[in-house]
Image (cartoon, helix red, strand yellow):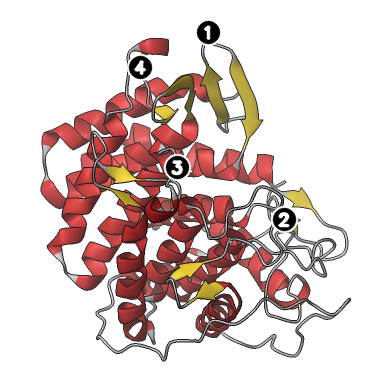
Amino acid sequence: MRANRKRTKSVLSLTLAVFLAGWLAACSDQAPTSLPAKTLTRTPDNLTQKGTKNLGNQQKAEQTYQAINKIFYRDNLKLYVERTEPKEGDKDYSTLWPFSGMLSALNAMATMPDNGANYKTELRRVLNELEQYWDSHGAPPAYDSYVVKFGGGPKFYDDNEWLGLDFVEAYHTLGDSQYLKKAEAMFDFAISGWSDDFGGGIYWRENDPSTKNTCSNGPAAVLALKLYQETHEARYLDWAKKILNWTRQLKAPSGVYWDHVMLGGELDKRTFTYNTGTILHSNALLYQITGDKTYLSEAQALAQASLAYFTTQDTRSGLAFYPDTPWFNAVLLKGYLALYQADPAHDPRYIQSMKSNLDWAWEHARDGRGLFSPDWTGQSGVTNPSKWILDQAAMVELYALFTRF
């Protein structure tokens, strides 16, 4: 359901100017004090943090980041645990995907307009600790889904593509060319998963030909386009168009994207916000690069469809809420931001709709430790002692992103 938020062009111009200025802000190299690792703690029943409604997005990002480090980080091994209350089958430490969520969060924090410079050293720390997942013996080499010295795990194409996008951001923030080279290596790994089965597309997991997913193709297209912007190598632009052309078969009549196609051609018609987010993001970038308004029209249509399809009206707050998938929603927000960077004259109601969700979540969806329920309405999960680090990292990233808009 669409959020009921209209803005005049003058307000839009001002907010976008603030966003772009923040996006391009220069940073210095100071680091915050490291937080010690502590044992996990339970949340008292019905205890939520109140009285902080007027905090800005920077302070919200910083407080949530501090809570994560206090509760999830293990300084002795330079790793995070995945949950405050491990589930059956959980490993001792975080798998790659949630760990990469912390990298995304710090990329966003390190470019906050007012205090981002203080997080550059923290960003470098997490980049260094990420190397515990690196498998140099792969063909091609890439990051395992679990810590290599503890046995590693299968490589997922999408996990490495998300890292590629973070490496591009780290290259911009830190000015270190090694991260651009790493981003290029992640793209090379991604396209090693391309095959002509099903007419093309990238598999979801290495050595597993059972599915080709939107989540392993959409971020590969975004990464290709960001690498094209950095290098101007035609192959990246060509690959992005090729990937997106294949992915169109996964577009649902609702205007959002289904999850994957299986061996034999059967479609998995589940829908998640991040799948539409990466395709939206790709089309916005293609419009910026080519000037072809066909891509802009598609990005606008995807933004409109995602808001109508994914949000649900909540009677208590009067707001339309996105699903209980914070990290997926952060990917969608980055698509929204790319659209409005490409088309600043357009109404930013999509961005504002997510901001209203986050404002509400700060007051109603946090527990006594400063950790969030994935249900931003606050009607479920708040007092559940088990919290997932990926949900928490996404909240840091989301609040940090909103310091620029």
Q: Secondary structure at mark 1?
A: loop
Between marks 2 and 3 in the image, the one whose residue lies nearer the viewer: 3
Give amino acid for label 1.
Answer: Gly
Question: Circle 1 sits on which residue?
Answer: 264
Q: Earlier in the sequence, mark 2 or mark 3?
A: 3
Q: Earlier in the sequence, mark 4 or mark 1?
A: 4
The answer for how far apart the CA atoms under marks 3 and 1 are is: 26 Å
Nearer to the camera, 244 or 198:
198
CB contact under 8 Å: marks 2 and 1: no
Give amino acid for label 2.
Answer: Phe
Question: Circle 2 sits on which residue?
Answer: 321
- The disc placed on residue 200 is 4
Nearer to the camera, 348 or 263:
263
- Mark 3: give few (<14), some (14-19) or many (20+) Cα within 10 Å: some
- Mark 4: give few (<14), some (14-19) or many (20+) Cα within 10 Å: some
The answer for how far apart the CA atoms under marks 3 and 4 are is: 26 Å
The answer for how far apart the CA atoms under marks 2 and 3 are is: 35 Å
Q: Residue at x 45, y 55 (%)?
A: 334
Q: Is residue 162 left or right of residue 225?
A: right
